[in-house]
Amino acid sequence: MAPVIEEVAFFDPACCLPGLSGEAHLSFIDSAAPSQRLGRYSFLSFSPFGIFKVTGGIAHWNDEPLDGRPFPALKTLLERFPLSPSDDGLPPFRGGAMGYIAYEAGALLERLPKLPISTKHGPEMVLPFYDVVLAIDHFAPSEQGTTRPRSWVISTGFPAEDSERGNRAKERLDWFIKRLETARQAHLPQSPPAIRGWCSNLSRPAFKAAVERTREYIRNGDIFQANITQRFSAPLPDAPEATPLAYYLSLRTHNAAPFAAYLDCGDHVVASTSPERFLTLDTQGNVETRPIKGTAPRILDDPAKDRAEAEQLAKSEKDRAENTMITDLMRNDLSRVCRAGTIKVPELCCVESYARVHHLVSTVTAEMKPGLGAVALIGATFPGGSITGAPKIRAMEIITELEQLPRRVYCGSIGYIGFDGAMDMNIAIRTMLFEEGRAQFNAGGGMTILSDPDAEYEESLHKAAAIFKALGTSVEDERYNLETSHEGDQEDGTAR
């Protein structure tokens, strides 16, 4: 049975998030910086009919443990709700799993004995299954040859049996539209108070030592490069306005990005303003990945200096070598599941400019082998090479040794896997986790033999600057605490 579809008047879905904040598993895949190529679609849903969750390496469906390994279990679940592909021109997600896969889920795919998998470190996957979704095309074509934003509510009727799916789909569609209409009447939250008192799990000396240790591993032939980051954390202010949603709305205003997301997972909330696509897969088997390696600051008050920064990035020997290496890694990963001769690199080391930084980006395309789908593609490539290093497995072992703490959703992936097989996932950089009254996020970069420890430390702070600004503070205001945080376990978020 085809889904029930109804077009609704377009509105910015972010304006209804406060009115939906009480709904279970509110999820918003947000093209906060729309572009016709990268940020064309946004999707919003809530009240899923099932939740696939992996904790401590054990998969669960609606809190009941499942037999077998997590990724095959996810594939089996998705196959229980088949939806035929459609060429109706509507947005590519028409219901399915929408949530995140944490960085540590890589241990479920590769032999990584040093990668922490533990129930105390939070789930490795949270993927609610949604039968109804608000789908937005920010660049829908019109009869006049132009584009305009359009919105649809799409209802599949799952998990009902075939004979009842039509009735359920219509009932759920009507309920969903009414709920959206009510939510749009809610007021946007007040600007939240600044989050201050940040600390890092790595002091400046400790971060520099990690860079030097990485260079030593490179000299010894263990790896060619590794992505090393530090984790910033702080308590939320004791104020009713200090909600994760209020901070997300500030983040999307100050640091708009094409692969942003807001996920309310109940006991924790994820807020991402990622500029990086990990993988997209359409229903015809076409794949694209867009690794980012190389960053330079924007100088928005001086266009000439801003252009110079972009030009210098484009010519950077270190950044181009790093980007090319990771592009080759992604080509190799894709070769496991994609047809020989279809893996191509249409763009190599191109500069793209975002709200606060310039990035060096490459594009790799391919075609899937017959009979393989989204879960197989994730299994061959996760986590993305741009946030691990090369070779991937050894780089991940070194990351665990040097960073000292689990990354969790940071450097994992956020996005959707449709019941029809379509998929789009980001790389969860510029991503915050709110949990137990605290906020945290990571920043860092790729280390090569050419890395300068002081420069790499400053680059990590520069990448964090836009998030700090959106949260009401700045790197300079927090610098003393950040640079002098002690080494060791910072699970409680306090410097010792």
Image (spheres, rainbow, N blue to C red):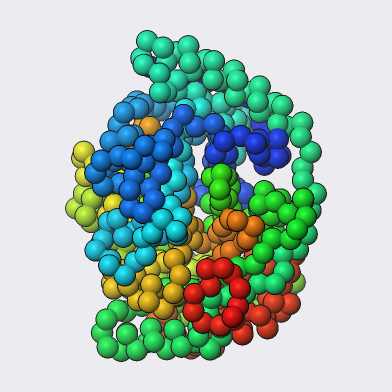
Quadrant in the picture for residue 478: bottom right
The vertical placement of 365 against 320, above or below, is above
Q: Nearer the viewer, residue 208 or 50?
A: 50
The vertical placement of 492 against 47, above or below, is below
Query: Which image quarter holds the N terminus?
Result: top left
Residue 334, percent from left and from top: 27, 56
Q: Residue at x 21, y 38 (%)?
A: 371
The vertical placement of 64 against 385, above or below, is above
Task: From the viewer's perspective, tell me whether residue 318 is left or right of residue 430.
Answer: left
Residue 328, percent from left and from top: 30, 67
Task: From the viewer's perspective, tell me whether residue 129 is left or right of residue 327.
Answer: right
Task: From the viewer's perspective, tell me whether residue 258 is left or right of residue 391.
Answer: right
Residue 350, percent from left and from top: 47, 66
Q: Residue at x 77, y 42 (%)?
A: 188
Query: Which image quarter holds the C terminus?
Result: bottom right
Q: Nearer the viewer, residue 300 or 42?
A: 42
Q: Residue at x 42, y 89 (%)?
A: 212
Residue 352, percent from left and from top: 54, 63
Quadrant in the picture for residue 238: bottom right
Q: How many labels does the image show?
A: 0
Q: Which residue is drawn at 54% across and 39% down?
A: 25
The vertical placement of 268 against 302, above or below, is above
Task: From the viewer's perspective, tell me whether residue 54 is left or right of residue 478.
Answer: left
Regarding residue 440, the answer to whether it shows in the image is yes
